[in-house]
Image (spheres, helix red, strand yellow):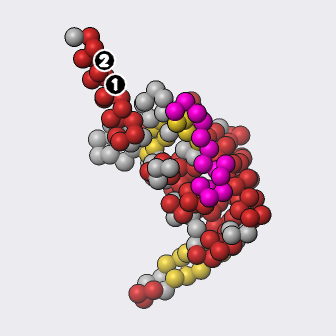
Amino acid sequence: MDKILYVIGGTAWINLVNTTYNSNKQKIDILANTSNTFQWLEENNLLRESDALALENEELLDSLIVELHSLRHLSETILSDLEQKGKLSLNTTDQFKRLVKKVEVNLTIDTKNEKFKLVSEGITARDHVLYNIVDSIIHTLDSISINRIRKCEHQECSLYFVDTSKSGKRRWCSMELCGNRKKAAEFYARKKKK
């Protein structure tokens, strides 16, 4: 599996939405497989060393996968609200608030290099993963213009991304995956007409 698919969205919550995608006209779900899920968590920097050890317990990993499915659905709803209304609906906001209340976080102060930094992290592996994804939602909605959150323009692609290009005109989830395919198809269509 191409690792670029794990991080193509540019932020953890959009990468979570992108854990379902189409390949050769089949729907693929990265979260359907525990080893792919674990790799996805690692690629998105959502695990501490202690979390990786804790998730060797199959029951904990299975439970986290259920939580990720639920959060993926909420993230899809957030994207839908943004596309249709330009903001979150009251219902989506309430769902998001309920999720946040369930995540337990520990605050500590990091004093490396004689500088103080407030560090937030989940108490359990589950809390840590969910906290980081929730934080990525809040950070994205707070710092990125909504029109920079896009769906790939390739007709067969269902992936989303945050457009961080200078011009703000990015059209493809990835030039390698979709941009080149689209350009090649257009080239061959023009060539066929001649």
User: What SS does tag 1 mark?
Assistant: helix
Q: Residues within 10 Å of mark 1 (few under 14, many from 20)?
A: few
In the rendered image, the vertical position of residue 103 relative to residue 29, given as above or below:
below
Q: Is residue 77 visible?
A: yes
Residue under label 1, please give it: 185
Question: Residue 9 appears at what percent x and percent y?
Answer: 47, 47
Q: Nearer the viewer, residue 98 or 75?
A: 75
| Image quadrant in which you'd find residue 65 | bottom right
Q: Amino acid at mark 2?
A: Ala
Q: Amino acid at mark 1?
A: Ala
User: What SS does tag 2 mark?
Assistant: helix
How many numbered circles does the render carry? 2
Pointer 1 with pointer 2, Cβ within 8 A: yes
Q: What residue sits 34% from the left and 40% below the top?
A: 175
Question: Residue 6 appears at what percent x and percent y?
Answer: 50, 52
Q: Nearer the viewer, residue 104 or 45?
A: 45
Q: What residue sits 48% from the left and 82% below the top?
A: 116
Residue under label 2, please give it: 189
Please identify the residue farthest to the right as the structure is shown.
Answer: 59
Please identify the residue farthest to the top as the structure is shown.
Answer: 193
Q: Nearer the viewer, residue 105 or 63?
A: 63
**Number of the label disc, if any, that sits on residue 11:** none
- Residue 173 in magenta stretch: no
The range drawn in magenta is 24-37
- Residue 33 in magenta stretch: yes
| Image quadrant in which you'd find residue 61 | bottom right
In the rendered image, the vertical position of residue 147 relative to residue 6, given as above or below:
above
Q: Residues within 10 Å of mark 2 (few under 14, many from 20)?
A: few
